[in-house]
Image (tube, rainbow, N blue to C red):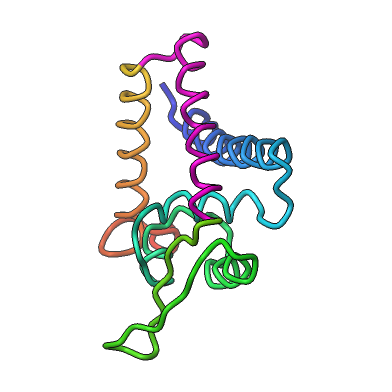
């Protein structure tokens, strides 16, 4: 079987799924009457959780496709979702954590996820299917990571 079309379809589907997920977050924020944070920021907030992180650590986690993490952290701080504190060891480094307002929103996002988990079974998606999908996505992630011209295949080597 030729790989070209299934590979291309996978790329498009991954991107489309991410956009749909962000839209689900946006709709939930709208339902909750939350106007001072966007869907990407709420995802960053959710992933910070109980941790205290630097912006660099957030960026390294890589959850924020197409977003400027520094800008989003600044906006979340301005809107009271995050607290910032300079590191006592490295004054250039700022550590962020959720404020009480941020924790409250994280709990709302967490409740959304719990509702979705309950609905997954009704949609015919069980743990086995999701684990298999995650396994395949991790293989693609490893493939793309190894293709970043660290001795692997690159676009320029095909020319």
User: In the image, what residue occupies the spot 72% across and 35% down?
Assistant: 31
Q: Is residue 54 above or below residue 1?
A: below
User: In the image, what residue occupies the spot 48% across and 37% down?
Assistant: 110
Closest to the observer: 114 or 43?
114
Q: Which residues are magenta?
A: 102-126
Magenta span contains residue 113: yes
Magenta span contains residue 81: no
Residue 4 image offset from top left, x and y in percent: 49, 33
Q: Is residue 59 above or below residue 41?
A: below
User: In the image, what residue occupies the spot 62% across and 40% down?
Assistant: 25
Magenta span dominant secondary structure:
helix
Closest to the observer: 101 or 154?
101
- Residue located farthest toward the front when viewing the structure as drawn: 100
User: In the image, what residue occupies the spot 31% across and 25% down?
Assistant: 131
Closest to the observer: 107 or 55?
107
Residue 42 image offset from top left, x and y in percent: 57, 51
The quadrant of the rendering that contains the C terminus is bottom left
């Amino acid at each position: 079987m030729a790989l070209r079309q299934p590979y291309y379809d996978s790329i498009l589907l991954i991107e489309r799924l991410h956009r749909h997920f962000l839209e689900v977050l946006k709709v939930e924020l709208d339902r909750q009457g939350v106007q001072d944070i966007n869907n990407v920021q709420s995802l960053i907030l959710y992933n910070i959780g109980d941790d205290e992180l630097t912006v660099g650590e957030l960026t390294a986690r890589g959850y924020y496709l197409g977003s400027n993490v520094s800008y989003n952290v600044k906006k979340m701080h301005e809107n009271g979702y995050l607290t910032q504190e300079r590191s006592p060891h490295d004054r250039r480094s700022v550590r962020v954590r959720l404020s009480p307002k941020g924790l409250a929103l994280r709990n709302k996002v967490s409740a959304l996820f719990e509702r979705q988990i309950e609905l997954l079974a009704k949609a015919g998606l069980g743990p086995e299917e999701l684990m298999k999908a995650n396994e395949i996505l991790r293989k693609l992630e490893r493939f793309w990571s190894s293709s970043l011209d660290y001795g692997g295949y690159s676009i320029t080597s095909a020319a």
